[in-house]
Amino acid sequence: MHLSETISSGFFFLAPWLVFAPVTGLLINLIFGRQFSEKVIGTVASLASGAAFVVSVLLAYSVSINHGERVSVPLAEWIHIGTLQLDWTFRVDSLSTTMMLVVSGVGTLIHIYAIGYMHEDVRFKNDEGRYNRFFIFLNLFIAAMMILVSGDSFMMLFVGWEGVGLSSFLLIGFWYEMDTLARPSWANSNAAKKAFIVNRIGDFGFLIAGFLMFWYLGSFQFDEVFKAAPAIAESAPWVIVAITLFMLVGVAGKSAQIPLYIWLPDAMAGPTPVSALIHAATMVTAGVYLVARSAPLYTLVPQAQYIVAMVGAGTALFAATIAVGQYDIKKVLAYSTISQLGYMIAAVGMGAYVAGMFHLIAHAFFKALLFLSAGSVILGLERGHHAHAHHVSHVDHGKKKKEGKKKEEERGHNEEHGEAFDPGDMRNMGGMRKTMPLTFWLYLIGALALAGIFPLVGFWSKDEILLDASLHYTSVYWQLTIAAFFTAFYMGRQIWMVFFGEPRHAAAAHAQESPKVITVPLMILAGLSVLGGALNLPFEGFHNLGHWLGYTLGEVEALPLDLKVAGISTVLALLAILISWLIYGRNTLRAGQPDPLKRPLGFIFTGMENKWFVDEGYFAVIVNPFKKISQFLADVIDERFWHDFVHDTVILGTYNWLSEIALDRYADQKGIDAFANWLGDATQSVSATLRKVQNGFVRSYALAVMLGVVLILGYLIFK
Amino acid sequence: MVPVDYYIILSAILFTLGALGVLIRRNPLIIFMSIELMLNAGNLAFVAFGRSYEITKGELFFNGQIFVFFVIAVAAAEVAVGLALIVEIFKTRKNINIDEMNSLKG
Amino acid sequence: MTSELIVFLVLSLVAVSSALGMISGRNAVYSALFLVLNFVTVAVFYLLLGAPFIAMSQITVYAGAIMVLFLFVIMLLGAESLAPANLLPWQRPLAILLAVILAVESIYLVFVRARSDAFVAAPDAAVNSMDNLREMAMILFNQFLLPFEVTSVLLLVAMVGAIVLTKQVKGEKR
């Protein structure tokens, strides 16, 4: 094949390698991982992910040289039953290639980061053999995510949807036998279960939407559905509304919106690369992708769009308030993620698909950067903790360490160094700017991007959403704007608490900077955060992303920069940062001091701290009654009634009665045995009687002979 | 002129008496003698029938007598052995009541 | 009623009564003597039936040898006395009944079923001639040679048997 021909027709045939490359990596590590060293395992996994990235680049290139023309790459037949015709087909268009690039690109960077991070993490948790498993799961995730974004039908998307759910479960519960403080506990596995179960509820919604789609629109395949939709929207619009709202349930599960966001903060129990990859950059954005992909359906039903937008906006604000009261560095970022996802969902809900996708990409960059940097900080603290503890003799067991405020749970059992230590608790940090300078600067870039400060990418993407909101739904606009204020505030709070002031714990004082394998991916992501705005600058001729996505989503209105909106958001952000400096930066927190906002805000702060008691509410209303019902069913209905009564007493008792009494005692013993015994006895008595003939007397024998003679003679004579 | 039937009837009566003696008496010697009586009755019948044949056919016929000859010889032999047995039994049991010899009792 | 008939009736009466006497005699010697009388009577019958040789051998062998043997043994065993108890009281009446039935059956058989027309006359002197005897001997040693020889072996066996049975083993107390 001539090279020029290949290029002009594109590299579409490579599409299956999006999935096959990570699967190959996963299989190699699965089969040979035991013999590989850590470096080899990590390299194999990263190369697999990198190969997927290369394929994505080539596919994007192919799409671009074909002027955004969409190409379907069929792989194999899947289900052909009656009217249901489903195949494994890869869909390569501008929207899917965008997602592919983000997932595989950020994913590969995180793979590389994880080589270094897991190397230290498995040593801190004393299980070096588990290194291999992590990369197998990571590759599994990439493969599943690729299926999700490149599928040509809702069912193929759902396969990937479930696959990433599974990978998420496996990775959250990676340290399944312990909690985040590495104590033996159910905590991590509970978090994984919670994620899976809550996701399942979302999947249920997705499936209902799928069934409705098949029933009324006749297919799962994107093009066919979108072609059939307008007709149904005319005749029975409730169908489309139902489909889109049930899909929203699925989105709420996967992308952590109200009311199914509760799993995401708990998912921070997984190792930090997992939090970065799955719960910030890629998996949680699957919901956004779904809505963007289903744009033709949503545009038919403005009522549903409104609901989607309101859900997104409400989530954005709600989560942002919770983030203000969190002490764990990753939890702050988790609630921040939920909040930013709210932004994205609000955007795509309003019909601003380009804005939503742009924010998705931007968020992937800076949130991955933030999470990975947080991981770097946590590792630094662990290193510091171990370095410090080795200087202290073990005689100090009894002496409680007064530096730093400890969580109540940490008192008590002794680990190697005396007390359980939470390296993620911001109250143990402080002054990290001096001990880990590189991490500090990278973190700062991420924080500023998140806060939406010009000219970082967050500014451009958030701004576009706000602009769209101001044009569509005012309430959405105000919710998002207030959320932006909170966003900047809690990020500022976090920066002051972690990096400024004095170290509040010996570990923070002895923290060490992370190795290059960790910091280099961070730097790349920081660069992307700074320069990413170029993707879709709101100036004439620069709406690159909009133009690109327009191939798939239809021509999008390219909005110019609105200075009023941009100005308000920037002012609010700077104001928030100033207030946060006043509270946390000017008089930095000392060890053991409670949060300065606690007293002024009182019960509001308590609510923020305790995530507005949502989890407790769910438990009281849903989980505990459910448990009680199933206990009742199990103990009373199943065990006592069905098992003990019906089975044991009734059935078994009847059977035993039948066999022991009816059959054995009466039929067998009295009936058959009696008859058989009677036969034997009768024979014996008859023979006893007959035996008397043999009395031993010759004379009687002679008499018998005589009798015989007489009889025979008589017979012969008289016959 | 005696009808042959009379001889036959006599033979039958003698035989019956011999059988009765075998059945009733308990002394084995008497029983033995009754057996001889039965044999004797049989001999008489032989000779009578031979004579009857001779008369009806009109020619000499000795088979009846020769049979009796042999019967007598056999009876003699039998008596010899039987009496020897009885003597032996008497030696061990000291009495010869036939009712006492019932060890074949079943 | 010819004289032969009378002779026959008288003789048969003697024979039957001697038989009865034999079977009912309390004393074994008396029974033996009755039996001898019976044998002699039967020998006379043989004479009447024209079988002189058999008559003679009956007297010499049966009455002379066999009965003498019987009497020896009776004397030897002192069998006059007998144990009193009868262990089978039901047997005697039954036996008599059966004997009577047998007799009746036999008589019925002869008179009703197997009648013969022959009449036995008193034999003439020719019966006693040597020619008859020679004739009988001829038949005995020609036609009946095998039974004759076998009978002689039988007698030998009986003799040996009798001796063996009563032989005293060394050391055995009498």
Image (cartoon, helix red, strand yellow):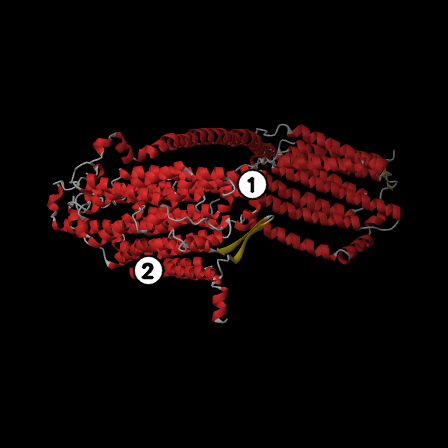
Q: Position of residue B7 (x, y in %)?
A: 80, 39
Q: Say left or right for C22 vs A624.
A: right
- Name the residue at 47% across, 52% down: A550
Q: Residues within 10 Å of mark 2 (few under 14, many from 20)?
A: many
| Name of the residue lying farthest toward the bottom | A2
Residue A245 seen in this snapshot: no
Same chain for the residues at labels 2 and 1, yes or no?
A: yes
Residue C154 seen in this snapshot: yes
**Mark 2 and mark 1: Cα distance apart in space:** 52 Å
Q: Secondary structure at mark 1?
A: helix
Q: Chain of mark 2?
A: A
| Front residue of C18 and C169 | C169
| Front residue of A285 and B33 | A285
- Name the residue at 87% across, 39% down: B1
Task: Kindly identify which residue carries mark 2.
Answer: A41
In the displayed structure, A28 sits above or below A467; it is below
| Front residue of A143 and A706 | A143
Three-letter code for the amino acid on which mark 1 is drawn: Ala
Q: Of marks 2 and 1, which one's residue comes earlier in the chain?
A: 2
Q: Position of residue A717 (x, y in %)?
A: 80, 36
Q: Position of residue C91 (x, y in %)?
A: 64, 30
**Nearer mark to the viewer, of 2 and 1:** 1
Task: Kindly identify which residue carries mark 1.
Answer: A233
Q: Secondary structure at mark 2?
A: helix
Three-letter code for the amino acid on which mark 2 is drawn: Ile
Q: Quadrant of the C terminus of chain A?
A: top right
- Name the residue at 51% across, 55% down: A89
Q: Residues within 10 Å of mark 1 (few under 14, many from 20)?
A: some
Q: Position of residue A508 (x, y in %)?
A: 17, 48
- Name the residue at 68% across, 46% down: B75
Q: Say left or right for A266 vs A419.
A: right
Q: Chain of mark 1?
A: A
